[in-house]
Image (cartoon, helix red, strand yellow):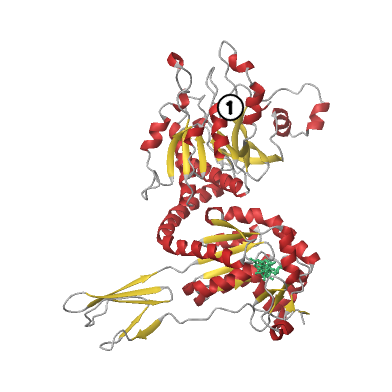
Amino acid sequence: MALTTTQCHHRAPPSHLPLSTFSTNPSSKSSLSFSSSCSYNKLSLSKNYTYGYGNAQFKISPKNKQGLKVMCVQSVPLKVMISGAPASGKGTQCELIVKKFGLVHISTGDLLRFEVSAGTEIGLKAKEYMNAGRLVPDEIVTAMVTGRLSQKDAKEKGWLLDGYPRSLAQAQSLENMQIRPDIYIALDVPDDILIDRCVGRRLDPLTGKIYHITNFPPENEEVKSRLITRPDDTEEKARARLQIYKQNVDAILSTYFSILKKLDGNRSKEIVFKEIESLLTQVQKEKPKQEKLAVQGDRYSEKASLSKNNWRGIPTRLNNIPHSREIREYFYDDVLQATQRSITAGKTRLKVEINIPELNPEMDVYRIGTLMELVRVLALSFADDGKRVKVCVQGSMGEGALAGMPLQLAGTRKILEFMDWGDYGAMGTFISIGAIGAKEVAEEDDLFILVAPQNAVGNCIIGDLQAMTDAAGKRPVILVNPKLKDLPASSGIMQTMGRDKRLEYAALFENCYLFRLLYEAGTQYPIVGVLRMSYPSPYELFKRVNDPDSPQKEKYIMLSSFPQRPDGDDINYALQGKTREQAEKEAGVWGYFSSMFR
Ligand code: AP5
């Protein structure tokens, strides 16, 4: 008989294998004694031996007449996060993963249920949240998880984190402690199936095994009679848990975008596990390379976040050209994160717009190198994640004597080809360079980055662009600093032919990142403010002011935010400290800016 209970029903804990010092007897002739710290031992053996134990592999080979060389190849333990909505099958897959990979399974749900059943102080606090299907407060869960992760077995065997992090704050706590998994698996299951799985779930309190009344019924009557139902597995509570999951999922996925593997969890548990098994095996193999990249990446983001702290959100000295490396890195990091978040959210037609002097081709301080570096950071980051990236620059436009390309793009392709694309051979494998057009879209390409696609006087890039995006289908296409407004020739051809269609097509691309310096109309100095948007945040308007603590220094303060891109009037009014309604009542509002937002 199935019971409803609050008693503990732990999933079976993984066994605890000793790893540190051990002895073995490789042959009848000699015995070895050594520790996992690995050193050279002098022994007399004539053959090669390899020993595997936990994560360590010991290779023993004859060195010379005097003795043997004992080498230790210690593979770094796997760190895995598994996530998904309630009843997506996390616990079921964890059982199988633990069996195969020997990781330490840390399930916050199980840990909390244990505390509840043991009647501890934590359990008493957690119980009311859990029974209502709500999240237990972060501080309780985070302390529990970090404590468990720091234990010896988790460090030595690797860990499998199930059900944590469940909010952006939890993800950030781990990031702050530099606890990052090698892979983040997200199980995707339709809502109605999830509810059915919750309601039909039964647990064996004796073995920790998970059953389902129809999908995985118990093996016999004896097991059946002791099965229990979780108190939060009623339909109403399952729906509440699902809703909370949906509110948090995007923010968490964006934290782990670069290592995210989304799997269809609505298949048999064996098929889902096969896929997980092959992913984890792959990660195990590639870990040394990944670790190297992670070290580089960490250095990079560490620097960028240090700069961000100094600037409190917006970098200063933006009119000083050339920009310092710090400022350039601020933009690279900001754009990268916004782009990753958008792609994680399933967006496929994206636009990055940065309008600062160094990236503004209409200014004499325009530096194509900065644009190229930005493109390289984006491409390498996606390539590091195993995606095949095509970086495209438009080719020559026009016919015969009228053929040519926009000045801004002259030589761009050559620069891209000669750039340093890292020392692990990303160029030519994960990254390739092409032109804009349908024929450049290869089956193996995962994502396209288009460098400043733009119309030229009398010539329109949109036909090629449209053909390319049609061929790309659901694969992401990212435009970096596009200029898709018509630039009519004296004949006026572009003004009239299909203009509406062109504009409609250009509007398909959503801003995932926008950074625009604001000046008084007709000037490029002083900077008045900044309009910034980094997906999924709203558009934020900052005003540049002198720092009261240090009048020689400038700083940016946030004035307001807008869910949609604000127009020139919205910005004018906000900078004057008025709402649109107030301002519209007053006559003679003077145009603060040029018409660029209209
Ligand atoms: P927790 O125990 O983590 O619950 P959950 O995330 O809602 O996940 P479940 O355990 O319900 O499902 P599962 O994905 O493991 O699915 P299962 O394999 O069992 O957390 C419980 C509560 O604790 C939370 O609501 C919260 O209050 C609190 N909490 C936990 N972590 C927290 C945190 N970090 N912060 C704050 N609070 C926290 O499978 C489900 C059913 O489907 C089973 O019957 C199974 O047999 C069946 N099934 C599985 N796979 C398949 C398949 N492939 N096909 C058919 N059926 C399947």
Specify whether residue 401 is in view: yes
Q: Position of residue 480 (x, y in %)?
A: 53, 35
- The quarter of the image that holds ligand 1 is bottom right
Residue 382 picture location, percent across and down: 49, 48
Percent x, y of residue 224? 72, 82
Q: Amino acid at mark 1?
A: Leu
Q: Quadrant of residue 63?
A: bottom left
Q: Camera-side residue: 303 or 410?
A: 410
Instruction: Return the residue at label 1.
Output: 484
Instruction: Report the side of 559 relative to 351 (left or right).
Output: right
Q: Quadrant of the N terminus?
A: bottom right
Seen in the picture, residue 465 relative to 499 is either above or below; the reply is below
The answer to which image quadrant residue 28 occupies is bottom left
Q: Residue at x 69, y 70 (%)?
A: 215
Residue found at the very far bottom of the displayed protein: 28
Asked if residue 566 lies left or right of residue 444, the reply is: right
In this rendering, position of residue 286 left or right of residue 570: left
Look at the image and tell me whether residue 323 can be seen: no
**Helix, strand or loop status at disc 1:** loop
Residue at 70% of width from left, 86% of height from top? Answer: 222
Instruction: Specify the farthest residue to the right.
Output: 585
Residue 210 left/right relative to 308 = right
| 371 shown above or below 88 | above
